[in-house]
Amino acid sequence: MAVVTAAMVKELREKTGAGMMDCKGALGETGGDIEQAVDWLRKKGLAKAAKKAGRTAAEGLIGVEAPGRSGALLEVNSETDFVARNDSFQAFVREATKAALSAGGSIEALEAAHLPGSSATLKDRLQELIATVGENMTMRRVATLSVSNGVVATYVHNQVTEGLGKIGVLVALESEGDVGELSTLGRQIAAHIAAMNPVAVDASGVDAGTIERESAILREKNAGKPDHVLQKIVESGLKSFFKENTLLDQMAVHPDHANKTITQVLKEAGSRIGKPIELKGFVRYGLGEGIEKEETDFAAEVAAQSGIGKKPDGEGAPA
């Protein structure tokens, strides 16, 4: 039987809003599997808010770069937040994000990219930085977006310096309208995406696994009802899920667009500038999503690195 720790219970409570004993029971029933425990609580009707958001479980920075009709988003992880605040680390993330604009959208291609005026690759540069700082770092994931006409707008949440922060968003707006107005609108929508974390642009973009998971939860919560009733419940439940979790159907959070869906916001903006606007896609990265962070004793770690309490040659404490 899996050992249920206080940290596991805390994480599940943060994900679901359920009570402590309910979370402990769910983890016991699911062998300590957090995601299965989320579903278990939802099936029992005990989860207040079981949106899978992915907790921040790694340090580092999200880099954002969008000079106009193209944009890049890059996550670079470090072991500690101390390194994330390091000027050299920030300079590397900035350089790598700019290189990602033309690197083809894969980490492998980005690692092989050369720095301007240098024979060194980004992978070489990162290895040098690791050796200098003494802490492991990785370029975890990268994405790019582009449009033929219009803008790729950005938003950075918890920004530590220009274009670097804890949450980064790209949103692509295709239009022949005024670039200035498109940029303002795009930034507002990007901020909405950062806050609401939609799973797709619209229902057609939701992956089959997510739909099956939501359907299974609805079926189990309503087990025992006649098949024709159950089918209607599932269909209605999925419509509600799409409305709450797909971008175009979500209610805009920006005060300039109160009580309007993102679809309505785009339509009204298109009428105002005299050109239709199509939202071609978006990417949202939250730092450390899905990475389990090892819990460490910080005091012991500092002591170990500084040699406090270490016995030289096995005899006595250091002078």
Image: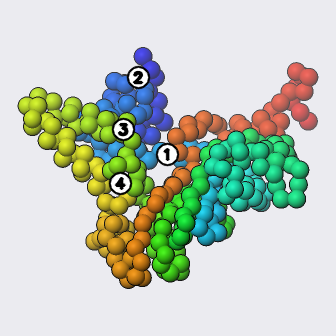
Residue 2 in picture, x, y percent from top left: 44, 20
Q: Secondary structure at mark 2?
A: loop
Residue drawn at x 48%, y 57% as measured from the top left: 282
User: Tag 2 or tag 4, which sits nearer the N-term?
Assistant: 2
Mark 1 or 3: the one toward you: 3
Residue drawn at x 74%, y 40% as measured from the top left: 136
Mark 2 or 3: the one toward you: 3
Q: Secondary structure at mark 1?
A: loop
Question: CB under 8 Å between callouts 3 and 4?
Answer: no
C-alpha gap between disc 2 and disc 3: 26 Å
Disc 1 residue crowd, few under 14, some 14–19, many 20+, Cα 10 Å: some
Quarter location, residue 254: bottom left
Task: Tell me the residue that label 3 is attached to.
Answer: 208
Task: Tell me the residue that label 2 is attached to.
Answer: 31
- Say the numbered circle drawn on residue 142: none
Tell me which amino acid carries mark 4.
Answer: Asp
